[in-house]
Image (cartoon, helix red, strand yellow):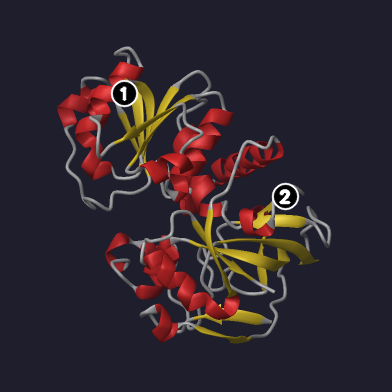
Amino acid sequence: MRAGWYERKGGAREVIEVGEMARPEPGAGEIRVRLHASGVNPTDCKRRGGQGTEDWGYFEHFPDFPRTIPHNDGAGVVDKSGPGASGYEVGDRVWVYNARYKRAFGTSAQYVCLPERFLVRLPEGTTFAEGACLGIPAMTAHRCLFADGPIEGKTVLVTGGAGRVGVYAVQIARWAGARVIATVSSDAKAERASSAEYIINYREEDVAEKVLAITDGAGVDRVVDVNLGVNWETNYKILKVGGVITSYSSMGDRNPRFPHYELMLNNITIRLVMVHCCPPGALLHAAADITRALDAGALTHHIAERFPLDELASAHETVEASEAVGNVIVEID
């Protein structure tokens, strides 16, 4: 099979190779998928480059292997089932997640073998490239929204509403019956977050002041936060009593100090989310809800750029440059 891989850490063009490998065989409880698209996420690039991952504890979940095929997310068709795997038929369309979780071989290849629980039915109306967008971004969004219970009738603030996770958080929250406010940094990004009922440009407006005006001073029930350490002061001003902050990133301040008393006085919950090691039941819940939202036509997908497998290094460089507004997809013939 054709695959892209690396055997040491370093720059994309320095370490990524594309060539032929033996086609894998599914083990007990595994299914082999013939992939047609693979999603590239920033964490895929960080792990390949080795930037800062040792002290984050990532290697517990993504240990080193002599050869690594990167990427967690992808989509394709079921090709073969291993012993004891019975939930899918050959030819079934699926999207996959967690392909690299404690495993050497991910989705930047023509074939991948995965435990059956890491496969999800892909509706006919969703392309393989769109299916490859879902894993980390959409499942992270779902966990942030639902880890503390249903959100129907609640008010949710999504910071970074145009980002890979944020854009799905906005759409899934709307689908689930929440009132959604999103923050963005430009008019162009406002277009990506247009499913939100209210959009705030945080570079031009005071977010706390605007949120309180929108909610008639009541504040929000949940915050899905892309930059926890930077947004503390805004968050504690706008959360209702008993509100929840769920954060999946804090790159602006990797080890933030938080305003304990300001949050404690309103009984605020702080939840940190890493989707790869979420409880299995939560991942199954996310997969089921995402599929229902796809079936309902509630999700749109923002693919910024597409690359063939032979240009895997360029796909990584594009993600690392942070220039692509949307998902970067590797298409696999």
What percent of the width, then of the height, locates residue 288?
A: 65, 40
Query: For this view, does 92 lie left or right of residue 41?
Result: right
Earlier in the chain: of badge 2 and badge 1, it is 2
Q: Is residue 29 visible?
A: no
Residue at disc 1, secondary structure: helix
Disc 2 to disc 1, how far (Cα)?
Answer: 38 Å
Counting the numbered discs, the total is: 2
**Residue beneath the point at 29% across and 13% down:** 217
Vertical comparison of 101 with 274: above or below: below
The one nearer the camera, 155 or 61, is 155
* x 70%, y 50%: residue: 126
Q: Which residue is mark 2?
A: 121
Which is in the foreground here, disc 2 or disc 1? 1
Give x and y (percent) for residue 270: 32, 35
Q: Quadrant of the C terminus?
A: bottom right
Q: Which residue is under mark 1?
A: 211
Residue in front for this viewpoint, 212 or 274: 212
Question: Which amino acid is tagged 2?
Answer: Arg
Do the residues under discs 2 and 1 have CB atoms within 8 angstroms? no
Helix, strand or loop status at disc 2: strand
Quarter of the figure with residue 22? bottom right
Q: Residues within 10 Å of mark 2 (few under 14, many from 20)?
A: some
Classify residue 307 as left or right of residue 144: right
Disc 1 residue type? Val
